Amino acid sequence: MAAPCSRMANRPLWRFITNVRRTGLKHTGVRQISLSSACRAATQTRSKTEGVPSPWKLYGAVCLQRLPVISQERNPIEDQFAELMHQMELERSLLSDHEQRLLEDSERMTRKQADNYDSDEEEADYGGQETITAQDQEDTWEQKLKHFQPALRDRDVGGTPLGSVERCLGDSLVLLVQQTVGKETIWLLPQAQWEAGETLRQTAERGLSSLPGQLCGEADFKATFLGNTPCGVYRYTFPKEVRTERCVGAKVFFFKAFLSAGSASQKEPFLWVKKTELQRYLKPPYLEKVDRFILNL
Amino acid sequence: MSIAVSRALCRVLSRQTAVPTNVSSLMGVDGHVSQGPWFASVLTLKTSAPLRAEPKKKKKVDPRREQMVRERLKKKLKKLERVPPELIPIEDFTTPAKYMDETRVRGAPQLPFEESERRALLLKEWSRYKQTQHRAEMEAVGLAVEAQREALEELRLESEELYQAALRPDPLLFPFNHQGPSYTPPKAQYEAPEGKYNNITKVYTQ
């Protein structure tokens, strides 16, 4: 039992100790990992010289989305349909209390204005009180509504800058930053290189918190990460000059997060873009992978 | 009466045994020694006044009676408890009486032919629009799921440990709260007016 156990334990062990990643071998022994925990203690002191380091560098990136604040504008067909539904509902409904009151009041008015109006009879019924008609109430309510000024729906008329979170309030926006990767400075989702001893989600959180604005303390993003699982991956190989035996390329794992609270100032090179505007800033192969998990629903 | 009986007994006994004498100084009229009612002779029954008092007889019966009463009450309670509790009525399922009133009926409108045609066509267009929307949504969700599956595959190729860490559920995620979109954006520094309301919901207890 010890021999096969130790052999099975080998693969995860040196990975754990020497912080080494596997190459693209088919992992038939992977399923027995659960047994290895018992054997780990026994084989802790195994040699560290084993194993080939994986040629891929790992990065954790965060796809931070600001969810829509207001409802979207309606299409013409949606508009028509909404009107139709409203009309049909009105036709099929019964009279409400308020409407009945209105009817009664109007009847009373017509009776008052008739020639054979007997005020004593009327007052006997209603106790001689000065009743407020439903129409008067409606008028007072309308007056109150006019006093209230709601915030404007479309603030983009002035052309808010792309870096502001308050852009298109009806759509969900994604955060883009400019980072230097290799020799170029490109727009991409904030990412950080993976370090030993942390999960990829922690890498992504670090990538978010270590943005230039965050470090200065000016921009403060409070994000809720949606679980530990990455939502997408982008794999690319380095250009031939940089490529060595050890690192052939890099894999970027994306994690989704929602912005819960954030106050961004305009100075940092941030961009909040809609899904349709992504293609202006991201490179085509990168965009292809990223576009899939950014939902515009 | 018991005194008379004891005295009669004494007389009988003393006549049979006693010598006929003229000594009467110590003796009473009856002819036997009796120094008052409190000092009965040895031969009489021991019936002193404290023993003759009535109320002490109820000591044993009282606790029994009280216990019986308590048991009866408990049995009654158990019977009551066995009855299943009354069901709380669902107020949504009963149409309130005031909606059955005929005066509330709105006049049924007479729609012209064009209007009804327009409505039918609009409904059909709407169903087509919604179908395309639904298909697009399903496709988008499918792509996202596929992207996640690929990511997990790549991660597994890289490192088993990271893969296992990724599969673990996040306990801090729920309960997740988010304010949904409203018609107008929220106003900064807006003070909502204070209002009073009377809560008239019926609360049922079982």
Image: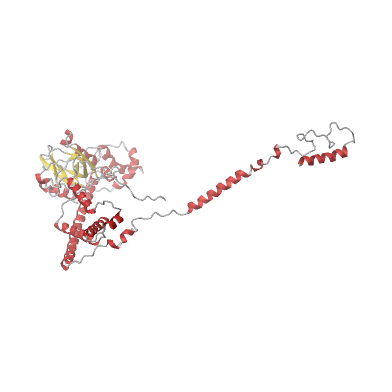
Residue A115 position in % (x across, y down): 22, 61
Residue ID at (38%, 55%): B89
Residue placed furthest toward the top? B25
Residue ID at (39%, 54%): B88
Left or right position of A175 against B203: left
Colour logic? secondary structure
The N terminus of chain B sits in image quarter: top right
Residue B54 position in % (x across, y down): 68, 41
Count of numbered marks? 0
Residue placed furthest toward the bottom? B113
- Tell me the quarter of the picture where residue B61 sits: top right
Can residue A246 be seen in the rendering of this structure? no
- Tell me the quarter of the picture where residue B7 sits: top right
Can residue B196 be seen in the rendering of this structure? yes
Left or right position of A264 against B162: left
Query: In front: A212, or A115?
Result: A115
> Up-down: is A115 above or below B145?
below
Residue A200 position in % (x across, y down): 23, 41
Residue A131 position in % (x across, y down): 26, 52
